[in-house]
Image (spheres, coloured by chain):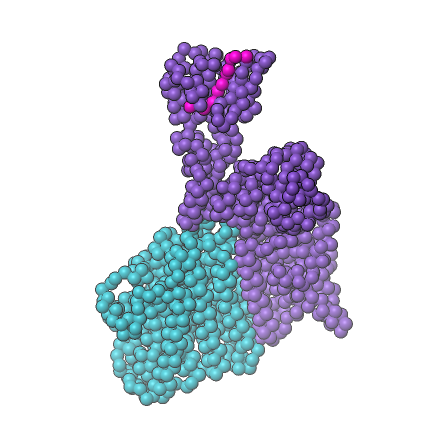
């Protein structure tokens, strides 16, 4: 899924071109009122053209060209939408293939007895056995066993992940493959309602509903269409006052160029492409509403670990007690960590630098929740490290315990974690483990602040440590010793003040907060409950993405606004192209309005309608890729976008129509 | 164009902006229901009327009260006009007003239009003028301000169900603002030479020795509210061009200032109510920009004069239709002011302006009279455009559009579009009907595009509740009495109802605190954007019709064509 499919490859373009015609179905078109009106007008003009040709009245060559471009306007709109849908459809097809022949080993309830059934027959609550090499048949919760699972089918990431009963890594997804061991899974989603099904529907755009903002914009565009219908519809009466008449095709051309066809044609493509950008970013939004809400976020709740600090604490200093040399402590700490595969253990070895290799006969002392220490046993010699209290407890009363505690308290005050190291009964000193703030995160928070977004760090650390990390990382605020209830309360408080809140989470106890937040991003590695509660799922389980998701939401809204502004400012030039052309027969003096000095009334009208049609495909790449987005305060963004799309929208058609008019005139098309 | 002319225009602009501040503060005191002296009189009104002044109305309740009040006003005024022959204070002994004319006049004054298909001094008794028209001059202005108050509450309130109480708003505006201000103004006018008497007329001996009967009446009192309430219905048929209704340049300046003062003040009331006075200044700045554009074009067109006349040896600007006592600049300024606000009082004949000058007056009305505008109406019209501008351009900052901390969503959009579409629908629709029916075509005096301008202006004026006449159109016919009345009614309440509905919806919404990510609705960028949206969305709609009227007219004049 993460592979980049180019937008404009031959097959996708061809499929979109074909779909553009299929979408001429009125039942499809009516979803977009402006394009529907354009299609009706095109159909009526076609009828009039045929009638004109049959009776030999009218300027058939000119009118035929108008009709041609009118239909092309509608088709270009359909094409844009089809192209946006195209990539999703290709993805959906490959997902469907995965899903097609899933088989399940349904457990009968007694021991390991199972029967093979099709996955579609599974119901919620059924238990299935999944063994090495099997595809997981349905979404569910691991109830027994541990297995490594390859989730490439969903995430595109081929490194296997561990799934085990209990805890926060119990959720499994249909279509992923167990590559070692076996697990028992209780089915949590009925056939057809699983994650895979939702993903297919999503990338395909089948369940696409207009988002609230899209609905509002559609109303505005329909309203403008109505206003222009009035403005153009009353012209024949006005012309009759002036003692003349206006040809219907000419009025049609004026009407279609004035109504906001450009933005209407691209509107759904923009929405689909916005969702698609998220999907390519390996984030699944359950609705377009969530993507829009992401742009409105005022407060970001960020988990400390993994987002603000690099996942794990790192050893940064060796602090011996009096009478012990640094090198002795360093060597002991290194030895005690050689067998420790945790990132913290590895960081101690790295900090200690080169030293003796693992001694023969060395036996690791594993960390248990009872002892809370780990280390290495070499014969009778026991080298251990662990939480200060745990090590002191293990050693019993020792003389320099208080000296060690003093060092440890100092370390804690600096926002770091102390680990005590002992060699047998000898207390050596403290290893300082520190959260390492990610490079560049301070600048990111600065950017967010300028955009008006407040960041809040969520951490289980004590307030002292939290404050120190908050200060170092530049986060606006923090919530220390955070329980899920605290998180929920914080979200509610922010929302009461009118703020929109985004967060990410993975545990079952995160579910209420995920559900309460306006944008809740659940980690794919998380529990089923968390994935149900959030309105987005991050397949890479990377909490940092929350920041990018906000950017994508903003980009979607900005693209929509930019093209709307462009479309509406286009009208000024179109008036000046068409009005003199159609009125000059009534009052020759109105030729003064022909500021572009267009060749003839016919060429002016034709040029305007050609420009109106061609601008749609010209803007398709912008609609699909989105306007350029840089984090900045709203005032700066507005100034920049107004200059590009507002002023540009005023100027572009003057230039475009003039150029087209030169071409039309020189080709003697009108 | 002269330096003195521009000096007056600049002086006027500075004065009305300066006056906006105290006016806005006073209006805010009324809006916020601060306890004021005369409180016992205020409470007495509520007791008599059985109104609980503390009761909040939902937008529906507010709208129902408003409609009941206004429709009752139409019925009452219609009855007075029909029955004036039987009623006292009728020294000239006028009979009852013809039914359709009475209907047109009743709708006209209740909707704050004051389109006059009658000649005041030749049709109406003193009672009709005072108890009929003048009362509605007050109440229609108070209604407009009440709607503005309700709209402001929509933005200022948070998660509220009510948008105020219509009866309280109307009462407070009338007794604390309009009545006292008009008493003071009327006395000032009397001191400056405007008549205020129950006498029917005065007899003068002309230089040729002939006896001339000059109509008189309670002019000063009507003049005060005609301007302050942006009503525009003159005591005399020629309105403020009559020396008794506008005796001097000083009175002329006071009249123009009082047209603008309340409309401009409301923008600052709004800013104060929403807790950021810069929001109000931004709206006022947009109004000033549009106003100055209009004045510049019109003044330039009139000062440049008519090339046909100049070819015949008449040098200088176009003096036709000007108030000769005050000159081109003052007449143009008055014309732009009266059409920018929905006043409609005139001191010149807009019909006789150069076509482009006439275009400015017409265009001002067609924009919805949001350039300061009628009391209340101009302000809420401007806010509708602000909502539209925020929605169109607001997305470009990457957030759901919001204005003053309120999200602009589908419901607001639907209602704003209705409020905006009403104007072209009625103006262009009714003009189209008049353009193709013989009854309609019988109206205009002129031929060609100028005649078309006369029709277009009439319906623009009616639907926009302006009430000024281009002149040249015979409006007192069954056809025009009915269609103009229809235009006035729909043009007034077809906007007020969606505005109240938006207010109700906004009041119920949460407030989003402004931040660096919020769309900026203060500052130059926003003012420029707002002006551009008004011109493109509001203005361009009328470009085709204007092309066939004044623009074609101007082109013919330039080419020296005579019809």
Q: Is residue A423 above or below residue B175?
A: above
Identify which residue is drawn at 42% across, 27% down.
Answer: A415
Identify which residue is drawn at 55% across, 12% down.
Answer: A379
Q: Nearer the viewer, residue B477 or A312?
A: A312
Identify which residue is drawn at 47% across, 74% down.
Answer: B487
Identify which residue is drawn at 54% across, 72% down.
Answer: B429
The answer to whether residue B100 is left or right of residue A270 is left
The verdict on residue B70 being magenta is no
The verdict on residue A388 being magenta is yes
Q: Nearer the viewer, residue B209 or B168?
A: B168
Q: Quadrant of residue A610?
A: bottom right
Residue B336 position within the rendered picture, expressed as x and y whole percent measured from the top left: 42, 65
Q: Looking at the figure, which quarter contains the N terminus of chain B?
A: bottom left
Magenta stretch, main secondary structure class: strand
> Over which residues does the magenta segment extend?
A379-389
Residue B6 position within the rendered picture, expressed as x and y whole percent measured from the top left: 38, 59
Q: Which chain is cyan?
A: B
Residue B177 in sight here: yes
Residue B543 in sight here: no
Q: Which chain is purple?
A: A
The answer to whether residue B95 is left or right of residue A561 is left
Q: Is residue B161 above or below residue A151?
A: below
Q: Looking at the figure, which quarter contains the C terminus of chain B?
A: bottom right
Residue A39 position within the rendered picture, expressed as x and y whole percent measured from the top left: 66, 63
Residue A604 position within the rendered picture, expressed as x and y whole percent measured from the top left: 65, 60
Q: Nearer the viewer, residue A253 or A189?
A: A189
Q: Is residue B316 above or below residue A151?
A: below
Q: Nearer the viewer, residue B350 or A483?
A: A483
């Amino acid at each position: 899924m993460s592979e980049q499919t180019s937008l404009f490859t031959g097959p996708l373009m061809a499929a979109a071109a074909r779909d553009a015609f299929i979408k001429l179905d009125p039942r499809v078109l009516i979803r977009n009122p402006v394009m529907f009106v354009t299609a009706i007008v095109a159909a009526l003009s076609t009828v009039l053209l045929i009638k004109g040709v049959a009776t030999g009245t009218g300027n058939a060559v000119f009118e035929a060209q108008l009709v041609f471009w009118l239909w092309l306007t509608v088709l270009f709109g359909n094409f844009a939408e089809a192209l946006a849908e195209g990539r999703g459809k290709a993805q959906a097809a490959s997902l469907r293939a995965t899903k097609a022949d899933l088989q399940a080993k349904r457990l009968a309830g007694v021991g390991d007895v199972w029967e093979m059934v099709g996955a579609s027959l599974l119901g919620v609550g059924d238990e299935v056995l999944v063994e090495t090499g099997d595809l997981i048949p349905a979404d569910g919760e691991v109830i027994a066993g541990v297995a490594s699972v390859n989730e490439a089918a969903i995430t595109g990431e081929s490194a296997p992940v561990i799934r085990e009963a209990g805890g926060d890594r119990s959720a499994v997804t249909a279509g992923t493959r167990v590559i070692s061991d076996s697990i028992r899974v209780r089915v949590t989603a009925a056939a057809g309602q699983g994650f895979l099904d939702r993903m297919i529907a999503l990338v395909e755009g089948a369940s696409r509903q207009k988002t609230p903002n899209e609905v509002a914009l559609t109303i505005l565009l329909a309203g403008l269409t109505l206003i222009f219908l009035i403005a153009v519809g009353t012209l024949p009466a006005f012309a009759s006052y002036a003692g003349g008449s206006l040809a219907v095709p000419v009025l049609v051309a004026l009407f279609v160029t004035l109504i906001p066809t450009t933005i209407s044609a691209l509107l759904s493509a923009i929405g689909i492409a916005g969702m698609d950008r998220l999907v390519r970013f390996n984030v699944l939004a359950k609705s377009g509403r969530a993507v829009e809400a992401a742009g409105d976020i005022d407060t970001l709740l960020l988990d400390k670990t993994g987002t603000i600090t690099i996942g794990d604490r790192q050893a940064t200093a060796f602090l011996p007690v009096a009478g012990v040399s640094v090198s002795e402590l360093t060597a002991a700490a290194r030895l005690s960590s050689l067998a420790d595969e945790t990132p913290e253990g590895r960081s101690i070895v790295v900090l200690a630098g080169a030293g003796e290799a693992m001694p023969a006969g060395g036996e690791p002392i594993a960390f248990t929740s009872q002892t809370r220490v780990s280390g290495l046993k070499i014969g009778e010699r026991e080298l251990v490290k662990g939480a200060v209290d745990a090590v002191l407890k293990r050693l019993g009363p020792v003389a320099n315990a208080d000296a060690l505690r003093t060092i440890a308290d100092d370390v804690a005050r600096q926002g770091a974690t102390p680990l005590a190291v002992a060699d047998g009964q000898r207390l050596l000193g403290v290893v300082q483990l520190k959260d390492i703030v990610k490079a560049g995160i301070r600048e990111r928070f600065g950017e967010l602040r300028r955009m008006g977004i407040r960041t809040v760090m969520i951490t289980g650390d004590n307030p002292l440590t939290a404050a120190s990390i908050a200060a170092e990382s530049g986060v606006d605020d923090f919530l220390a010793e955070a329980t899920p209830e605290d998180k929920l309360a914080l979200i509610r408080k922010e929302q009461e003040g009118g703020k929109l809140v985004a967060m990410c989470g993975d545990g079952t106890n995160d579910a209420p907060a995920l559900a309460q937040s306006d944008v809740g991003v659940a980690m794919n590695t998380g529990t089923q409950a968390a994935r149900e509660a959030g309105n987005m799922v991050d397949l890479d389980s990377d909490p940092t993405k929350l920041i990018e998701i906000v950017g994508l939401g903003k980009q979607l809204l900005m693209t929509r606004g930019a093209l709307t502004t462009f479309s509406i400012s286009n009208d000024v030039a179109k008036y000046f192209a068409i009005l003199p052309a159609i009125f000059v027969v009534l009052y020759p003096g109105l030729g003064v309005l022909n500021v572009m000095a267009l060749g003839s009334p016919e060429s002016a009208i034709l040029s305007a309608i050609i420009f109106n049609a061609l601008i749609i495909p010209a803007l398709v790449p912008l609609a699909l890729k989105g306007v350029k987005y840089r984090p900045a305060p709203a005032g700066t963004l507005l100034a920049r976008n107004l200059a590009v799309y507002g002023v540009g929208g005023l100027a572009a058609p003057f230039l475009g129509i003039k150029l087209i008019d030169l071409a039309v005139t020189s080709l003697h098309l009108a | 164009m002269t330096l003195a002319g521009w000096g007056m225009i600049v002086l006027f602009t500075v004065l009305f902006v300066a006056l906006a501040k105290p006016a806005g503060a006073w209006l805010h005191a009324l809006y916020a229901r601060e306890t004021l002296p005369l409180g016992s009189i205020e409470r007495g009104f509520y007791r008599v009327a059985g109104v609980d002044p503390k009761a909040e109305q939902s937008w529906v309740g507010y709208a129902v009260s408003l409609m009941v009040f206004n429709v009752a006003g139409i019925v009452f005024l219609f009855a007075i006009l029909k029955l004036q022959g039987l009623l006292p204070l009728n020294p000239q002994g006028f009979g009852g007003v013809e039914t359709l004319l009475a209907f047109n006049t009743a709708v006209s004054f209740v909707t704050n239009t004051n389109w006059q298909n009658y000649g005041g001094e030749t049709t109406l008794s003193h009672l009709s003028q005072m108890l009929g028209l003048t009362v509605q001059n007050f109440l229609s202005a108070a209604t407009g301000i009440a709607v503005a108050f309700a709209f402001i509450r929509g933005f200022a309130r948070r998660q509220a169900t009510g948008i105020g109480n219509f009866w309280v708003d109307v009462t407070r505006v009338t007794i604390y603002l309009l009545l006292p201000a008009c008493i003071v103004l009327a006395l000032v006018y009397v001191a400056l030479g405007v008549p205020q008497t129950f006498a029917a007329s005065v007899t003068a001996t002309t230089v040729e020795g002939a006896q001339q009967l000059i109509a008189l009446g309670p002019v000063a009192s009507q003049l005060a509210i005609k301007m302050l309430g942006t009503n525009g219905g003159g005591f005399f048929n020629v309105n403020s061009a009559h020396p008794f209704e506008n005796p001097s340049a000083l009175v002329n300046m006071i009249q123009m200032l009082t047209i603008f003062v309340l409309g401009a003040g409301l923008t600052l009331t709004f800013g104060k109510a929403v807790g950021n006075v810069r929001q109000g200044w931004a709206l006022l700045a947009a109004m000033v920009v549009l106003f100055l554009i209009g004045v510049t074009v019109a003044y330039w067109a009139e000062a440049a004069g008519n090339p046909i006349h100049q070819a015949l040896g008449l040098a200088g600007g176009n003096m036709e239709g000007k108030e000769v006592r005050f000159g081109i600049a003052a007449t143009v300024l008055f014309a732009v002011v009266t059409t920018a606000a929905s006043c409609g009082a005139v001191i010149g004949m807009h019909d006789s302006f150069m076509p482009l000058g006439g275009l400015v007056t017409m265009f001002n009305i067609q924009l919805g009279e949001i350039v300061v505008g009628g009391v209340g109406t101009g302000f809420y019209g401007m806010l509708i455009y602000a909502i539209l501008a925020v929605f169109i351009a607001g997305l470009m900052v990457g957030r759901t559009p919001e204005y003053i901390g309120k999200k602009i969503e589908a419901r607001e959009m639907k209602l704003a579009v209705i409020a905006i579409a009403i104007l072209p629908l009625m103006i262009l629709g009714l003009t189209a009907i008049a353009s193709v029916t013989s009854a309609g075509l019988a109206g205009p005096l002129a031929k060609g595009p100028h005649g078309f301008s006369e029709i277009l202006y009439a319906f623009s004026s009616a639907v926009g509740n302006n009430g000024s006449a281009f002149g040249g159109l015979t409006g007192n016919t069954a056809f025009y009495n009915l269609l103009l009345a229809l235009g006035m009614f729909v043009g007034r309440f077809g906007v007020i109802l969606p505005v109240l509905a938006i207010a109700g919806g906004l009041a119920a919404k949460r407030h989003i605190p402004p931040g660096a990510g919020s769309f900026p609705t203060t500052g130059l960028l926003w003012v420029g954007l707002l002006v551009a949206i008004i011109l493109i969305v509001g203005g361009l709609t009328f470009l085709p019709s204007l092309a066939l009227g004044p623009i074609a007219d101007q082109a013919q004049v330039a080419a020296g064509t005579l019809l």
